Image: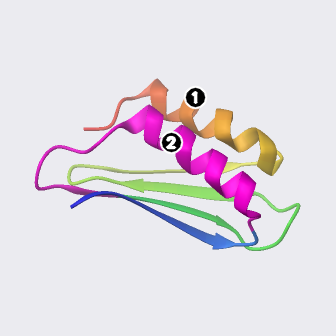
Amino acid sequence: MGLKMHFDGFWDSDTRGNIEHAIRDCIGEPPKDEEWLVSIARPYPFQPCSVQVKTLNQTRSRLFFEDSSALSKAIPDWLKLYPLK
């Protein structure tokens, strides 16, 4: 169990690592015996990035139009608006 991250599309390893690290710092570990999934997709460069977060009790999603390098701040800022449960 725990927090799983799934990246789909074109991501360089530095950007992917920065985003994953920022999200893990923001979310922390899910409650024991729960699995949370964060899916991040950008099919092609310069297109919006789709983010979906699934927990046992909720699913949240949003499109981000920011540059890939800005997502490591934008995604956690969005997640902090309404804490996951």
Provide the secondary structure element on which disc 1 rests. Answer: helix
- Rendered view: 5 above or below 71: below
Q: Quadrant of residue 56?
A: bottom left
User: Residue at 50% across / 42% down in the picture?
Assistant: 23
Could you say where residue 79 lies in the image, as x and y percent from the top left?
Answer: 48, 35
The amino acid beneath tag 1 is Asp
Q: Residue lying furthest left in this view?
A: 33
Provide the secondary structure element on which disc 2 rests. Answer: helix
Q: Residue lying furthest right in this view?
A: 46
Precedes in sequence: disc 2 or disc 1: 2
Rounded to the nearest angstrom, the CA distance separating label 2 from label 1 is 10 Å
Instruction: Say whether residue 32 is magenta.
Output: yes
Task: Locate residue 14 relative to residue 79 in the image: left or right.
Answer: right
Q: Residue lying furthest top in this view?
A: 81
- Rendered view: 45 above or below 70: below
- Rendered view: 37 above or below 79: below
Query: What residue did someone put label 1 on?
Result: 77
Could you say where residue 82 lies in the image, as x and y percent from the top left?
Answer: 40, 28
**Crowding at label 1, few (<14), some or many (≥20) Cα neighbours within 10 Å?**
some
Could you say where residue 46 lies in the image, as x and y percent from the top left?
Answer: 88, 60
Could you say where residue 53 lies in the image, as x and y percent from the top left?
Answer: 42, 53
**Crowding at label 2, few (<14), some or many (≥20) Cα neighbours within 10 Å?**
many
The amino acid beneath tag 2 is Ile
User: Residue at 29% across / 42% down in the picture?
Assistant: 29
Task: Locate residue 38 relative to residue 21 in the image: left or right.
Answer: left
Q: Which mark is residue 23?
A: 2
Q: How is the image coloured?
A: rainbow
Q: Where does the magenta region start and end? A: 11-36
Foreground: 74 or 18?
18
User: Residue at 66% across / 33% down in the picture?
Assistant: 73
Task: Locate residue 76 relative to residue 83 in the image: left or right.
Answer: right
